[in-house]
């Protein structure tokens, strides 16, 4: 069970404070949405929570079973899908799934072949990532994060590039992992992205 504590977390770029003094505790299996417009700092906050970026002030603490996790070991506990994360374009979907499964196993011993079925792209399993549409790439990104055996799931604008059917697929997958992971979503106020969240943070309140 993973718990996160943000203690007066603030981030400054050049002379501008992006956000200041965020004080927050995220309990195990809790679901949080970080709301904000483009450029408001929500993606930066998500990266700080993940340990990818350091805050200018304050601290972020992660705990498993109430024991602190060292920053360099957070990778194995986090799965993230975001527009700024790139896929390996020369791999096929099957090759990418096998590659990722070696470094961060899928839940329930899901195989690479199972993965292509779960993201409903079995027909494109042997296509290179660079041959996929933006919506198909987004399904791959979301699938790799959602099915990863990691207790913390971070999703940055998850409905980006998804059509209606893709959005319905996303909602079904999220329902499958509720109460199994701690989930944090960044959203431009698109309710279908965070329909399941029981806590929210409006980043404009921390300027």
Image: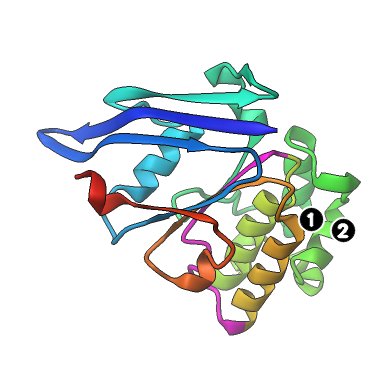
Image depth: mark 1 or mark 2 in front:
2
- Report whether 18 appears left or right of 106: left
Instruction: Assess whether mark 2 and mark 1 are in contact (beta carbons under 8 angstroms).
Output: yes
- Residue 151 image position (x, y, % from top left): 69, 39
Residue topped by disc 2:
113
Quadrant of image for the C terminus: top left
Q: Which residue is mark 1?
A: 94
* Front residue (pair 133, 107): 107
Give percent across and percent down for residue 119. 74, 66
Residue 189 location, quadrant: bottom left
Query: Does the magenta run of residues contain 163?
Result: yes
Q: For residue 157, which numbered disc appears in the image?
A: none
Q: Is residue 85 left or right of residue 87?
A: left
Percent of width and height locating residue 50: 50, 35
Quick one: SS at disc 1? helix
The colour scheme of the drawn protein is rainbow
Part of the protein shown in magenta: 150-164
In what element is the residue under mark 2?
Answer: helix
Quarter of the image with the N terminus is top right
Q: Which numbered disc, 1 or 2, marks the residue that appears first in the sequence?
A: 1
The answer to which quarter of the image holds residue 66 is top right
Mark count: 2
Q: Is residue 33 visible?
A: yes
Q: Give me the C-alpha separation between circle 1 and circle 2.
A: 7 Å
Query: Does 44 sit left or right of 68 as displayed?
Result: left
Secondary structure character of the magenta stretch overall: loop
């Amino acid at each position: 069970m993973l718990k996160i504590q943000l203690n007066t977390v603030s981030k400054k770029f050049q002379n501008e404070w992006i956000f200041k003094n965020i004080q927050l505790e995220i309990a195990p299996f809790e679901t949080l949405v970080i709301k904000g417009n483009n450029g408001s700092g929500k993606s930066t906050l998500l990266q700080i929570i993940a340990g990818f970026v350091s805050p200018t002030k304050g601290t972020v603490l992660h705990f498993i079973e109430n024991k602190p996790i060292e920053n360099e070991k957070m990778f194995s506990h986090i799965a993230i899908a975001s527009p700024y994360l790139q896929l390996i374009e020369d791999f096929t979907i099957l090759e990418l799934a096998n590659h990722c499964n070696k470094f961060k196993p899928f839940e329930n011993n899901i195989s690479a072949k199972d993965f292509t079925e779960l993201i409903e792209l079995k027909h494109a399993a042997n296509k290179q990532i660079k041959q996929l549409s933006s919506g198909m790439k987004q399904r791959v990104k979301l699938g790799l994060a959602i099915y990863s055996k990691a207790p913390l799931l971070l999703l940055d604008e998850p409905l980006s590039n998804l059509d209606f059917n893709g959005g319905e697929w996303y909602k079904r997958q999220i329902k499958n992992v509720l109460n199994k992971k701690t989930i944090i979503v960044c959203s431009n106020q698109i309710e279908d992205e965070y329909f399941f969240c029981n806590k929210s943070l409006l980043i404009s309140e921390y300027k």
